[in-house]
Image: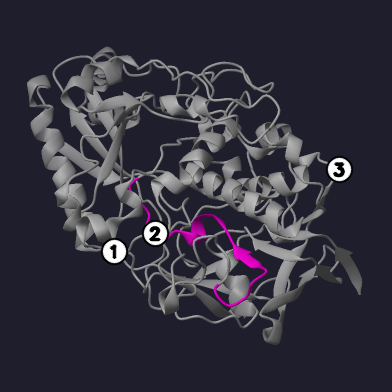
């Protein structure tokens, strides 16, 4: 059996795993990183319009649990992980997002605070090259990644400026789509195709974390599937990772510290395959299912203009005592505007002539505001990942995913946002607000939540509650979710973990 030895072994090579490795690498430690997919360059992604390499480990390995509704989960197995296909929004959590039980009497408190995470937020904003980070982002020297820095915000678009006074507080959207060139990445080209950026501007680990990927202390093992952890219960320690290589060969990985940084599906699956059962393990899964509000107004908003996909952020629905009974929300105008196809189809169905179809469709398109809304929900234990009877190409159980519908907490929050948008935008002629599902499936949060006792899997340091040398990192550790995109918080937690690993292992 092949053996790999390192000071630290990390499963997963996304932004979480790579940022967790950075401080240990700087401290001279040896890091072995296991990636079940493979490295696929941005140029190769553009060629076939696929993010993942065509290798067995990159195939999705989840199935819908029997008797539960299907859900369109979207994730990437490969070097860079799911930040290969994200759109780049990077708002921070607020102080109360970490203390929902204390502040509003609902959900649970995180075992850490905004103040604890603030220096790492600043470092993460610099590492990702965030444009429009809060002013205090420049107060940090960053994690030492060459060329990384926070950037000025993108200009508000004509659409932003039209609605900003009525949806205040309104501010530039923090995003990892650069407003200036950075680390060889050009400024955002404004094509609004961010999930596969045509000019490689939007941050991904491949263009922003080369210093980690190319560090001599890192050994990146592609097409290496972490099958299970071998335990020493008496010592409360993990002895090795048992892995499977590209040829089906068995590999044993031995280290002083182990980090699971795979995803909200893979982290609990590895623990379950290893017999590390805890009551909360695999439970409280959550995804931010975007909601699209389409509002017809009197004036032309000049859609199709703007430095990037979205450039403004409304915090009008973000904070207040209402969070004790319904969800908070954030909302961003979608600069490309609504789809023209249905507007053209309506004219054709009405048997208008071609010029009339064109004129009316463009006029309606210009007066239409699409708002992208994110909300939160109360954690549900019934939303979970467990092991299926069916197996994948490696002989491992598929991840069985149960994801029941949202609770009234989230649904009432959406309904209130709709009502407030209609009222706030009335001076611009808003009447009806059309509500439709937006993108979903990209945020695999919860399943290994931090806290204490039976209702948690890891502590505030993301250390497993039963095994001293095991850490379970990333969005799977979130005990609550906030109504904002999670990647910046994942990056901040990872940098914080990296400091701890460097201090403990050196």
Badge nearest the viewer, 2 or 3: 2
- Residue at image coords 82%, 69%: 254
Q: State the separation of the CA atoms marked 2 and 1.
A: 10 Å
State the residue position of label 2: 110
Disc number at residue 216?
A: 3
Q: Which residues are magenta?
A: 465-483
How many dots with numbers? 3
Q: Main secondary structure of the magenta part?
A: loop
Task: Determine if residue 266 is in view.
Answer: yes
- Residue at image coords 39%, 67%: 403
- Residue at image coords 59%, 80%: 276
Q: Secondary structure at mark 2?
A: loop
Q: Secondary structure at mark 1?
A: loop
- Residue at image coords 41%, 40%: 92
**Left or right placement of residue 349 versus residue 446 in this view:** left
Q: Nearer the viewer, residue 365 or 103?
A: 103
Location of the N terminus (image quadrant): bottom right
Q: Nearer the viewer, residue 290 or 463?
A: 463
**Left or right placement of residue 301 versus residue 117 in this view:** left
State the residue position of label 1: 107
């Amino acid at each position: 059996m092949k053996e790999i030895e390192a000071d630290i072994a990390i499963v997963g090579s996304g932004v979480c795993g790579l940022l967790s490795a950075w401080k240990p690498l700087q401290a001279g430690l040896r890091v072995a990183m296991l990636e079940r997919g493979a490295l696929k360059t941005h140029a190769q992604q553009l060629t076939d319009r696929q993010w993942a390499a065509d290798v067995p480990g990159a195939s999705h390995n989840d199935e819908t649990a029997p008797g539960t509704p299907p859900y369109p989960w979207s994730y990437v197995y490969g070097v860079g992980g799911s930040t290969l296909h994200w759109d780049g929004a990077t708002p921070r959590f607020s102080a109360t997002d970490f203390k929902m039980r204390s502040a509003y009497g609902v959900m649970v408190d995180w075992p850490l605070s905004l103040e604890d995470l603030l220096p790492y937020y600043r470092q993460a904003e610099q590492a990702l090259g965030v444009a429009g980070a809060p002013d205090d982002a420049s107060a940090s020297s960053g994690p030492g990644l060459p060329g990384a820095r926070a950037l000025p915000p993108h200009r508000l678009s004509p659409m932003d400026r039209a609605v900003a006074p009525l949806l205040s507080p309104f501010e530039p959207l923090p995003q990892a789509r650069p407003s200036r060139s950075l680390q060889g990445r050009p400024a955002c080209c404004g094509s609004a195709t961010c999930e596969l950026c045509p000019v490689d501007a939007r941050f991904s680990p491949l263009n922003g974390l080369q210093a980690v990927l190319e560090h001599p202390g890192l050994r990146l093992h592609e097409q290496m599937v972490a099958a299970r952890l071998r335990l020493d219960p008496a010592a409360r320690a993990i002895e090795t990772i048992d892995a499977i290589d590209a040829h089906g060969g068995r590999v044993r990985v031995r280290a002083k510290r182990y980090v699971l940084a795979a995803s909200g599906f893979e982290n609990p699956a590895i623990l379950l395959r290893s017999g590390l059962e805890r009551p909360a393990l695999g439970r409280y899964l959550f995804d931010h299912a975007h909601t699209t509000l389409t509002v017809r107004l009197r004036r032309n908003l000049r859609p199709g203009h703007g430095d990037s996909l979205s450039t403004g952020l409304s915090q009008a629905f973000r904070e207040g005592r209402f969070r004790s009974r319904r969800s908070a929300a954030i909302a961003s105008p979608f600069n490309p505007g609504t789809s023209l196809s249905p507007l053209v189809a309506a004219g054709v169905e009405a048997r208008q002539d071609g010029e009339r179809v064109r004129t009316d469709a463009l006029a309606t398109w210009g007066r239409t505001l699409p708002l992208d809304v994110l909300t939160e929900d109360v954690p549900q234990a019934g939303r979970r990942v467990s092991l299926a009877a069916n197996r994948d190409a490696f002989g491992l159980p598929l991840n069985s995913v149960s994801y029941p519908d949202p609770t009234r907490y989230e649904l009432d929050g959406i309904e209130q946002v709709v009502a407030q948008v209609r009222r706030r935008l009335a001076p611009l002629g808003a009447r009806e607000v059309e509500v439709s599902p937006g993108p979903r499936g990209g945020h695999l949060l919860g399943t290994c939540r931090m806290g204490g006792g039976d209702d948690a899997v890891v502590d505030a340091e993301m250390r497993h509650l039963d095994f001293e040398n095991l850490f379970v990192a990333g969005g799977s550790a979130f005990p609550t979710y906030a109504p904002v995109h999670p990647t910046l918080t994942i990056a901040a937690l990872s940098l914080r973990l990296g400091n701890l690993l460097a201090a403990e292992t050196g």
